[in-house]
């Protein structure tokens, strides 16, 4: 069979119909990955707008732009949006798009689950934002500490939307984590042993296990909250034998591993980008891989450092303080490896490289000021001040947003087939870098001056005004830098230069595909012989007998966990509306639970159950 005929056959098998039904029913990881990224970016813009509103209110003493309740609601929505609906999902979007391409697979292990997790993520965000739309936004912060978030002090539906939308999101996130684990461990191309995996896979695999272990704590906490609020239980009520500290224990057991969920994949991105633009392999590949895994593991032993001020034994504080110190070692290993790679290479300062280097610099600052908060006496002094606000933003924005923008400039051409404008990209970086440091570095000083966090205004005699004005100006400059990239992407989509397969001369398998990749990715499943697939002398796709075409159905090979030796062929299910419909019925279920419409909740549950059965039922075509 000719190559043209093979490509036509593969296109018929894998390409979704260009119809409305095809758009909603697709299970193609490339479509879903882009949708994840775009949706998460919208949440970034919404959360950023909420931040700017807060900064206008705090730009001077005794401002009245926002009242105390409005400020608390916007403050809460900003934190909830950024932490839960932006930071992790945008990394998942890149992973969904890139990981099958990086490992030479034709899709994720569970494509319909992949589609469901996207629709559940989108609808959970819509569920959250129904609350402010009806004037009942949550006002307890993204951490929602009890007892303030109990029914006595928060009688509106805002905290019910918070709890149920988070439970909905955990369903999506848990499904995505399981999908990543199976995909990475069992669908790697033959020859891609564990030691040859790209570093982005190590970080995604690590956080996927962390999600499965940590997220149940958040789910349980939210279930307990809702039961206390609307169903008469007393998990957090001292008068009835409960304990509000239980919320903090459950929340931070989830919360600190979550920091690494929104941080480690971004470091994996840096580890992929830095060597390409340094024109040499990364220094210390195995040490970075081990450090990534240990960061995820030790991350479960430091959650109590968020609670040093509540009162606990010296032994407990010493243990968790030591854990906080230890975990910084593993990030230091990665930083030294990146710096050594740049130092020993011939760096090319593209926009993507600038964002990666900027992320390293901000990560160092965020890591160092975070070490201080792990020292018990220091934490007692700065715990409820703006010093902690500075730290969390250096970690989240510096170690998440800047790597994400590096990824947009690096992998964006692979996703869209168009190059972004490098000059605009560099302008965007410098404006963002200046704005970010102007916005968040003065917060360290404000914290040391004694400015409390979580306040909506402050008296004029405290001396906080000038610094807060700098912070507000920096926030708007940061927003301008983000706007430049949005304009750049819009121009690129309309008239950017054609990217070609490998515009950066990169080494990963994803760059062996067209830009944007075809629905089936590659005609021949590749065989991997080194860590740098496109920098070695082997033709990864060489297959003169067409043995690795796999065009009898939607197929991709399965391999062993460690050595990636072929053991079978997986049949990939086709497009289906069932994942979307299941997400919609779950959306109705959570709406019904918020308003305690039990008959509707039961009907939605049964409909979801029936749809999942239909979804999982194999068709005759798939069995063949």
Image (cartoon, rainbow, N blue to C red):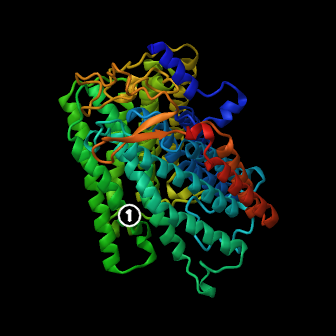
Q: Residue at x 56, y 68 (%)?
A: 220
Quadrant position of residue 139: bottom right
Query: Where does the N terminus fall, quadrant-wise?
Result: top left
Q: 326 or 31, which is in the foreground?
A: 31
Q: Dot 1: within a 10 Å radius of its alpha carbon, few (fewer than 14), some, or many (20 or more) residues?
A: many
Residue depicted at x 32% and y 61%: 298
- Report whether 142 appears left or right of 613: left
Q: Is residue 128 left or right of residue 260?
A: right
Position of 252 relative to 503 (above/below): below
Give percent across and percent down for residue 193. 28, 41
The residue lying at 54 percent from left, 64 percent from top is 218
Q: Is residue 220 visible?
A: yes
Q: Which residue is mark 1?
A: 300
Q: Which structural element holds mark 1?
A: helix
The quadrant where residue 286 appears:
top left
Q: Is 302 situated left or right of 520 in this image?
A: left
| Residue at position x 39%, y 67% in the image | 305
Residue pushed farthest left? 344
Taking 306 as reference, is 44 above or below it? Answer: above
Residue 466: % across, % down? 50, 46
Residue 391 visible in the current orientation = no
Residue 261 location, x and y as percent?
Answer: 43, 51
Q: Quadrant of residue 527?
A: top left
426 vs 328, nearest the viewer = 328
Residue 426 image offset from top left, x and y in percent: 42, 24
Residue nearest the observer in this picture, 543 or 172: 543
Q: Quadrant where the C terminus lies?
A: top right
């Amino acid at each position: 069979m000719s190559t043209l005929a093979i490509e036509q056959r593969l296109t018929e098998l894998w390409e979704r119909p260009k119809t409305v039904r095809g758009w909603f029913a697709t299970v193609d990881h490339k479509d879903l990955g882009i949708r994840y990224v775009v949706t998460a970016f919208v949440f970034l813009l919404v959360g950023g707008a909420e931040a700017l509103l807060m900064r206008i209110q705090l730009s001077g003493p005794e401002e009245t732009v926002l009242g105390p309740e409005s400020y608390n609601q916007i403050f809460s929505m900003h934190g909830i949006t950024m932490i839960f609906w932006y930071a992790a999902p945008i990394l998942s979007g890149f992973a969904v798009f890139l990981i099958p391409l990086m490992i030479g697979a034709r899709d994720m292990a569970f494509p319909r689950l992949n589609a469901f997790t996207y629709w559940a993520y989108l609808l959970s965000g819509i569920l959250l934002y129904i609350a402010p739309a009806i004037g009942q936004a949550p006002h307890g912060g993204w951490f929602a500490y009890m007892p303030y978030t109990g029914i006595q002090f928060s009688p509106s539906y805002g905290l019910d939307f918070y709890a149920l939308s988070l439970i909905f999101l955990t369903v999506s996130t848990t499904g995505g984590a399981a999908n990543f684990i199976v995909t990475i461990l069992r669908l790697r191309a033959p020859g891609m042993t564990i030691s040859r995996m790209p570093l982005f896979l190590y970080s995604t695999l690590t956080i996927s296990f962390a999600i499965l272990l940590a997220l149940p704590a958040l789910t349980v906490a939210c279930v307990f909250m809702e039961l206390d609020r609307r169903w008469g239980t007393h998990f957090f009520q001292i008068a009835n034998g409960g304990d509000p500290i239980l919320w903090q224990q459950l929340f931070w057991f989830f919360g600190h591993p979550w920091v690494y969920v929104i941080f480690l994949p971004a470091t994996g991105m840096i580890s992929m980008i830095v060597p390409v633009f340094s024109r040499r392999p990364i220094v210390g590949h195995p040490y970075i891989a081990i450090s990534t895994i240990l960061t995820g593991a030790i991350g479960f032993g430091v959650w109590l450092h968020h609670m040093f001020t509540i009162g606990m034994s010296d032994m407990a504080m010493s243990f968790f303080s030591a854990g906080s110190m230890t975990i910084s070692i593993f990030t230091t290993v990665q930083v030294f490896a990146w710096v050594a790679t740049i130092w020993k290479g011939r760096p090319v300062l593209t926009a993507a490289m600038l964002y990666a280097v900027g992320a390293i610099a901000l990560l160092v600052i965020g890591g160092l000021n975070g070490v201080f908060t792990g020292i018990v006496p220091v934490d007692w002094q700065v715990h409820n001040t703006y010093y902690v606000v500075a730290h969390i933003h250096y970690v989240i924005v510096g170690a998440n947003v800047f790597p994400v923008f590096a990824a947009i400039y690096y992998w964006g051409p692979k996703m869209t087939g168009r190059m972004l404008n490098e000059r605009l990209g560099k302008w965007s970086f410098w404006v963002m870098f200046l704005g970010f440091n102007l916005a968040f570095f003065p917060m360290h000083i404000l914290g040391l001056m004694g400015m409390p966090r979580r306040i909506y205004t402050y008296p004029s005699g405290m001396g906080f005004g000038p610094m807060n004005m700098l912070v507000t100006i920096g926030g708007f400059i940061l927003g301008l830098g983000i706007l430049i990239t949005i304009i750049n992407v819009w121009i690129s989509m309309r008239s950017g230069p054609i990217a070609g397969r490998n515009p950066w001369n990169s080494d990963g398998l994803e760059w062996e595909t067209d830009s944007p990749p075809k629905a089936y990715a590659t005609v021949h499943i590749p065989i991997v012989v080194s860590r740098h697939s496109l920098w070695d002398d082997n033709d990864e796709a060489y297959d003169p007998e067409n043995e690795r075409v796999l065009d009898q159905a939607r197929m991709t090979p399965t391999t062993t966990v460690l050595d990636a030796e072929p053991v079978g062929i997986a049949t990939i299910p086709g497009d289906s509306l069932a994942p979307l419909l299941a997400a919609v019925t779950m959306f109705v279920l959570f709406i019904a639970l918020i308003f305690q419409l039990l008959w509707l909740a039961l009907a939605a549950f049964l409909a979801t159950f029936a749809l999942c059965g239909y979804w999982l039922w194999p068709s005759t075509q798939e069995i063949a």
